[in-house]
Amino acid sequence: MKTFIAVFMLVSVSLTSTSYADIKPKKEAVVVVSDKNEMFTFKADKKFLGATIEVYDSNNTLTGKEFVFHRKMVIDFYYLPADTYRITIKKDNELLEFQFIKE
């Protein structure tokens, strides 16, 4: 009887512990920190250093191009007219797109 209770407790503890084990969420490659005050601030993963940033307006015209040279960067839209902008970040086979609306 004691062995049955010991086995039952061992099985219940092992099942309970695996149910509480949490899977690590996938880390995003680029995280938008802020998109207020006419600035688009983002933090990129280390693998995106050297990536190309391109900003397009609503007419799909390229308005700016830059390289990711720091993990945290700011794109300033202060001197651009009010519009909806598309921000693309490209590195190798990965392409990330974001939208910024300047009012």
Image (spheres, helix red, strand yellow):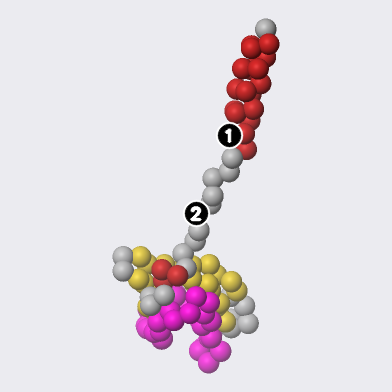
Q: Is residue 71 magenta?
A: yes
Residue under label 1, please give it: 18
**Magenta region:** 59-88
Q: Can residue 32 be seen in this snapshot?
A: yes
Residue 39 in the image, given as x and y percentages of width and height = 57, 82
Helix, strand or loop status at disc 2: loop
- Name the one closer to the observer, 13 or 96: 13
Residue 98 in the image, given as x and y percentages of width and height = 47, 70
Helix, strand or loop status at disc 1: helix
Q: Is residue 102 above or below residue 9?
A: below
**Residue drawn at (53%, 92%) of the image:** 79
**Residue drawn at (68%, 11%) of the image:** 2
Q: Are marks 2 and 1 in contact (CB under 8 Å)?
A: no
Name the image quarter holding the N terminus. top right
Q: Is residue 85 above or below residue 63?
A: above
Q: Amino acid at mark 2?
A: Lys
Could you tell me how many numbered marks the image carries? Answer: 2
Q: Is residue 19 above or below residue 45?
A: above
Tell me the crowding category of disc 2: few under 14, some 14 to 19, or many 20 or more residues within 10 angstroms, Cα based: few
Residue under label 2, please give it: 26
**Residue drawn at (53%, 72%) of the image:** 43
Spatial CA distance of label 2 from label 1 is 20 Å
Q: Earlier in the sequence, mark 2 or mark 1?
A: 1
Tell me the crowding category of disc 1: few under 14, some 14 to 19, or many 20 or more residues within 10 angstroms, Cα based: few
- Name the one closer to the observer, 7 or 15: 7
- Left or right of 17: which side holds 84? left
Residue 25 in the image, given as x and y percentages of width and height = 53, 52
